[in-house]
Amino acid sequence: MIVSRPAGSAHRGLGEWILQRLTAIYIAGYVVVLALHWIIAPVADYDGWRQWTGAVSVRVSATLFFVSVVIHAWIGMRSVYMDYLHTLWLRLAVVIATAVMLAGLLTWALAVVWGAGA
Amino acid sequence: MESENKRPIYLDLLKIRLPIGGVVSIIHRASGVLLVALLPVSVYLLQRTLESQAAFVRVLAAVHETFARSAMLVVLWFFCQHLFAGIRHLLMDMDIGTSRRAGRAGAWLVFAATAAVVLYAAARIL
């Protein structure tokens, strides 16, 4: 298949490549730090849980986490689709469905992170 | 010309002996897709725990069930497999472990590290 590409498009993959790695590093670091935190200081009760999740530092780091996860998932899923889905309309439909799902998920996650009170 | 061409003209997945690095690679993809599919579950659980005292207690009681704990171990397995294969990826980006021998050793290490974490967690929570 011959694909004509606009000038400069060769650099587009590089941005995704870097973004996939930056988000990976943040996600990995965040999850490891969270796991260690919960092992050292387990969640005691509902009030403690609300207080901890209400802290601005926790909310900001969780926001960065969910943004990273959604970007990482988007790039990852797209490259899987590009490798295995060769029927154009099907690939397009699945890509759009994934984009909608991930956008919805991010909105929902951020509403949970920033919504509930404190 | 045609008789000299010994290339297989089909890809029979059962006849391809995937090298260990290839196995890690395909599991990296599969575990990534599964983790994405599980994202809504984690957001839902987070939402429930913040909803009310009663919901918080219900979620905590639910994750104490043996079934839920076993499911969590499976998810942990996906996650660790993806994490360690990802770390191997990042190291290879920096030209660490790119030789054939190191690549194979690294692939085995991914499985070993994953097994270690999952077994440790299993011993702790089951």
Image (tube, coloured by chain):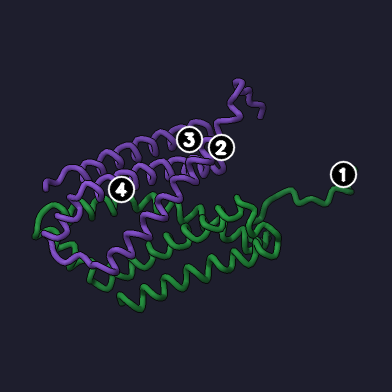
Chain colours: A purple, B green
Q: What is the distance, in whole Å, between disc 3 and disc 4 at their CAs?
A: 36 Å
Q: Are marks 4 and 2 in contact (CB under 8 Å)?
A: no
Q: Name the residue that disc number 3 marks.
A: A90
- Location of residue A70 in the rendering, given as x and y in whole percent from the top left corner: 38, 43
Near-viewer residue (A18 or A110):
A18
- Location of residue A9 in the rendering, given as x and y in whole percent from the top left corner: 58, 26
Image quarter hosting the N terminus of chain A: top right
How busy is the neighbourhood of tag 3: few (under 14 within 10 Å), some, or many (20 plus)? few
Of labels 4 and 2, earlier in sequence is 4
Q: Name the residue that disc number 2 marks.
A: A86
Relative side of B108 to A111, left or right: right
Q: What is the distance, in whole Å, between disc 1 and disc 2 at their CAs?
A: 29 Å
Near-viewer residue (A55 or B105):
A55
Question: Which chain letter matches label 3?
Answer: A
Give the foreground label among 3 and 4: 4
What residue is at 38 percent from the left and 46 percent from the top? Answer: A69
Q: Name the residue that disc number 4 marks.
A: A61
Q: Amino acid at mark 2?
A: His
Callout 1 and callout 3 share a chain: no
Q: What is the distance, in whole Å, between disc 1 and disc 4 at their CAs?
A: 61 Å
- In the drawing, what numbered circle is on residue B2? 1
Q: Secondary structure at mark 4?
A: helix
Q: What is the distance, in whole Å, between disc 4 and disc 2 at their CAs?
A: 38 Å
Above or below, B68 relative to A77: below
Of labels 3 and 4, earlier in sequence is 4
Q: Amino acid at mark 1?
A: Glu
Q: Amino acid at mark 4?
A: Ser
Above or below, A64 relative to B28: above
Q: Secondary structure at mark 3?
A: helix
Q: Amino acid at mark 3?
A: Leu
Give the foreground label among 1 and 2: 2
Q: Secondary structure at mark 1?
A: helix
